[in-house]
Image: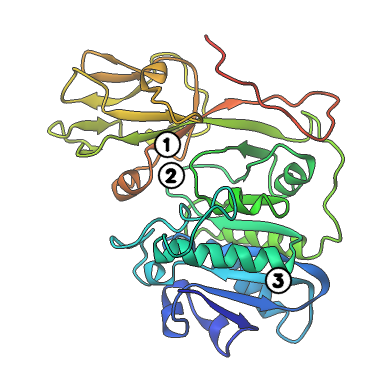
Amino acid sequence: MLTIRQGLPDGLLNLQSHELYTKLDGPTLFQIPGRRTPPIFISVLLHGNEPVGWNAIREILYRYQNKTLPRALSLFVGNIEAARYHQRHLENQPDFNRIWPSPAGNIHTDECIPEQGMAYRVYETMAETGLFASVDVHNNTGLNPHYACVNRLEAPFLHLAALFDRTVIYFTRPKGVLSLTFSELAPSVTLECGQPNCARGEAHAIEYLNACLNLTEIPAHALTRRDIELFHTVAIVRIKPGISVGFQDNELDLQLIDNIDHLNFNELPLNTLIGWQRNSSSIVLRTIDEQDQDVSERYFHLDGQALRVRRPVMPSMLTRNIQVIHQDCLCYLMERLTLPDSATGIIEPATGYIES
């Protein structure tokens, strides 16, 4: 499924993300030389309805059409077929950000689906090439600030994230995400650049990617709590299979409050209303923690038919997009993670949960 190319074909930078299928046969890894090595790996369009990464990198490459990049670039352009139809992924496809080998190399290419084999080949190619850093660029569908995500609490990862924004999220689930796999090779981040087709998000991504290309090194000294605002994703909230969900329809299994995405990055107090269930016998959410345990009743409870928050928590990625809710999740739940005043460069997250 993967094409590896040296340089860019003529006219590629003139295309919008939904037009890339006219020049590319599928997922493509471009190797572009630069003054410094090893290369930086930049991934765009893992989700076809998130064009910010492609828009940002093509603007940067326009600027360097007649100049050498300051650092070699390995550019992975992911789900081109889904981008053609402005979809996260097509119905016959897996999510392209859930297919990456973890731990890296623990995959037999003759036993996996084609997309997993493609992902392994990208990883294997970059492992052989060597890597300066990895940046995976995304939009999201709800009202969220711009932020960066890391999968390791080590100083170079946090510095790379803080270059994008003070808000940094640490997560280890879901499995199979690109940044988690590439964190074994080099400092790795995921960028969340707000909603699609937002000029501010594209400008922010351009500024950040250009800065990364011009880095000579990534700092290794420890950060403190003054440098970033750090959160830890402790659970993923999904809708149970076969459950209908939406807004302003009391015939649905779960009717969500209208402005649910306004709750993102707000520390919700006890008993915050999320929605209403038609069946009040059991919670229709499936909330999975980092140990893959169902902890729905730790975070939610039913008050008659009203679905409410059981404990103070901060959600992210809440969206009104029903398709995304079914394809991915309703939201992630986060807790604050405090950096020590004097750190060694590696921060250990608290184990378990703080009861409140």
What residue is disc 3 on? 73
Label 1 element class: strand
* Nearer to us: label 3 or label 1: 3
Type of amino acid under label 2 = Gly
Q: Nearer the viewer, residue 274 or 104?
A: 104
**Crowd rating for badge 3 (residues with CA inside 10 Å; few <14, some 14–19, many 20+):** many
On screen, residue 337 versus residue 317, left or right, reads right
Type of amino acid under label 3 = Leu
| Quadrant housing the N terminus | bottom left
* Residue 250 pos. (x, y %): 15, 31
User: In percent of the image, x 78 and y 46: which residue is there?
Assistant: 156
* Residue 248 pos. (x, y %): 21, 35
* Nearer to us: label 2 or label 3: 3
User: In percent of the image, x 79 and y 23: which residue is there?
Assistant: 340
Q: Residue furthest left?
A: 251
* For marks 2 and 1 on the same chain, the one whose residue lies earlier in the sequence: 2
**Crowd rating for badge 1 (residues with CA inside 10 Å; few <14, some 14–19, many 20+):** many
User: In percent of the image, x 41 and y 38: which residue is there?
Assistant: 318
What residue is disc 2 on? 142
On screen, residue 328 versus residue 104, left or right, reads left
What residue is disc 1 on? 331
Label 2 element class: loop
Gap between marks 2 and 1 measured at Cα: 10 Å
Gap between marks 3 and 1 measured at Cα: 33 Å
Q: Which residue lies furthest to the top in this view?
A: 356
Gap between marks 2 and 3 measured at Cα: 31 Å
* Residue 127 pos. (x, y %): 68, 63
On screen, residue 229 versus residue 233, left or right, reads right
